[in-house]
Image (cartoon, rainbow, N blue to C red):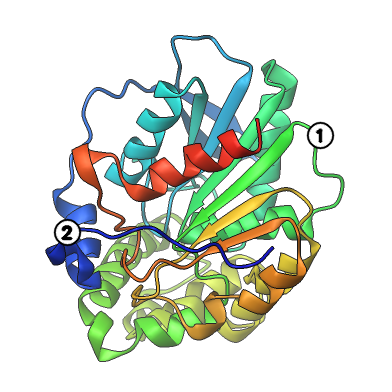
Amino acid sequence: MPIIPSKYNPPLLFKNGHFATIYSGLIRKVENVSQERERLHLPDGDFMDIDWSYSSKKPERLAIILHGLEGNAKRPYVLGAVKAFCENGLDVAAINFRSCSGTINKLYRSYHSGVSEDLEAIINHILKTRGYSHIIIKGFSLGGNVTLKYLGAHKNIPKEIKAGIAISVPCYLYGSMLQLHTFKNTLYNKKFKRDLLYKLNMKQQLFPNKIVKSDIQKIKTLKDFDDVYTSKAHGFENALDYYETASSLPFLPNIKIPTLILNAKNDSFLSEECFPTKIAGQNKSLYLEIPKYGGHVGFYDKKNVYYNEKRTIEFINSLKI
């Protein structure tokens, strides 16, 4: 599909991408969202926690939400999406990736930007245990890449999957890694690295035969982290192999389910490759919207209902889902 013209025009302060990103991540509050936790036991002996929220309409429609790097199902951007879905007649399964629900997972591995096989396991579980006929997948940042990779790389997508939405998605991981290492992203870089190293030190205590403290001490950058841990723990040769293999960009032409990609032009995490205008123009199932503003998952809008939340509901309504 052609690029969708964006109508998003936030207040002056929120036209600054960094302000929008930081405010939405650290200051925004979303109230009155109820969640019930289900622990899904995976075939490999590990687990993931699903936080369920229910619409009062007892619908046949479900939204699956995937959070971003070092996020969880209780982050404001997830709760905002949960609230919007429930108020519009959808139940919600907000996923906590392995190690992200407040309890460290059982295995040495955890999650990464291309872990679409875990999304597949979640979908299969839901289809076996619940009666939903219409399922929408919405992913933020890392979760957006997982969403797109699942829809483009996996064969035999269940007929119940009706749409995908990817918000602030780094679909070209190598390019986003380079962006995160630039000076403008120093604060985010340090925050991600601190959180990741905290968990890796916990892993080291649980699996001293897998990694030693001296290896952790060598990690100075996010790329180092992916070389030392992400790639080795998840079957990739090194960080560069991980970025190439896990990126959703090569799989976008294969997507057959209507899918909205919403990436702000002033998102400091994204490289030019993360605005796939040519691919979207050649794939009738891809709807690409590139607002001038929004930062990274920072689409502030009136009454604490963010633009990405409004656009998601508009999108699925336009598809008559």
Viewer-side label of 2, 1: 2
- In this view, the residue farthest toward the right is 156
Q: At numbered mark 2, what does the secondary structure look like: helix, strand or loop? A: loop
Looking at marks 2 and 1 on the same chain, the residue that comes earlier in the sequence is marked by: 2
Residue at 45% of width from left, 46% of height from top? 311
Residue 252 lies in what quarter of the image? Answer: bottom right
Q: Which residue is mark 2?
A: 11
Is residue 44 visible in the rendered image? The answer is no
The image shows residue 205, relative to residue 247, as above or below, that is above
Q: Amino acid at mark 1?
A: Lys
| 15 relative to 159 in the view: left or right | left
Q: How far, Cα to Cα, is label 2 from label 1? A: 41 Å
Mark 1 neighbour class, 10 Å CA radius: few under 14, some 14 to 19, many 20 or more: few
| 246 relative to 23 in the view: left or right | right
Residue at 85% of width from left, 51% of height from top? 155
From the top left corner, tell me how far across and down residue 300 is, in percent: 25, 52
Q: Which residue is mark 1?
A: 159
Mark 2 neighbour class, 10 Å CA radius: few under 14, some 14 to 19, many 20 or more: few
The image shows residue 241, relative to residue 49, as above or below, that is below
